Amino acid sequence: MSLVEPVPGEPAAIASLSRDDQRAVDRALVVADYHAGIEQALRADGVSLDSRAEHRRERLLSLVESTDADRVVFLGDLMQAIGDPGGAERGEIEVLLELFDERGVPATLVKGNHDGAIESWADLDVTDGAGVRLGEVGFAHGHTWPAPEVLDSEVVCVGHEHPAVRLEDEVGGSRVERVWLRGSLAGEPFAERDESVRAGAELVVFPAFNDLVGKTWVNVEGQEFLAPFLPEGLGDGEAYLLDGTRLGRYQTV
């Protein structure tokens, strides 16, 4: 079993993190691209939507409880605003973190490109965008190159991409589905920077938790990845639907 296992039907995973004494393991609920306050940004672009802050919050808290998670790891972009957040967005995050605190569940944010100076006001542990290694699992947002300690992990988790596939039926109808991308962590793009990856390491690209964000359709010609090390860093990547359905090589879905 992998150290990182998706929660069936959800854009979230449980990571098994060994503690310092190596005899105990924390269960971390990991989500990417929460994008609190996205409705405000969409309204500024002319898209009128009611706030879904409560829905996001209740969904995440329900996952914490149903998975018996010891902590939460955000794989970047907890915020939507790239600069200082507005009052509603900041309030959404503060309420969420207060509820974690009430439950005794610590939270860690691997800083993403949308997270601004969140460490100056939000009550959670914040790492820089190059990421952090916890136990044998490395976490990075994906908008920049991962730290060497992250690349030396058994499993490397990234977000940022919002991967999705476009599926078509026999009569020409189509739909877009969020997907997981999983495969070996290929060393070629990192070798060009005189960095190395652990032999046999796995790369997991997380779907976005927030379903309102834009998406990278990984099986549509002309779409480009956002991370500087993708797609070259995903050696034999396969796509999986949120329900666990294996779609095979993502390029040929």
Image: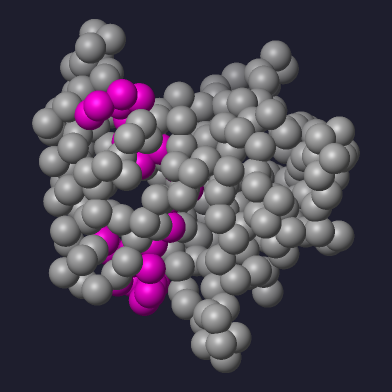
Task: Decide which of 234, 9 is in the foreground and name it.
Answer: 234
**Splitting the image into 4 quarters, where does residue 219 fall?**
top right
**Splitting the image into 4 quarters, where does residue 154 fall?**
bottom right
Q: Which residues are magenta?
A: 61-85
Q: What type of secondary structure mainly makes up the magenta span?
A: loop
**Relative to 239, does residue 219 appear above or below in the rendering?**
above
Quarter holding the C terminus is top right
Quarter holding the N terminus is bottom right
Left or right position of 161 against 28:
right
**Residue at the (81%, 35%) spot, across then down:** 193
Task: Decide which of 135, 96 is in the foreground and name it.
Answer: 135
Left or right position of 140 against 31:
right
Point out residue 145 in the picture as x, y percentages from the top left corner. Answer: 66, 37
**Relative to 135, does residue 198 appear above or below in the rendering?**
above
Left or right position of 91 against 112:
left
**Residue at the (38%, 72%) spot, across then down:** 69
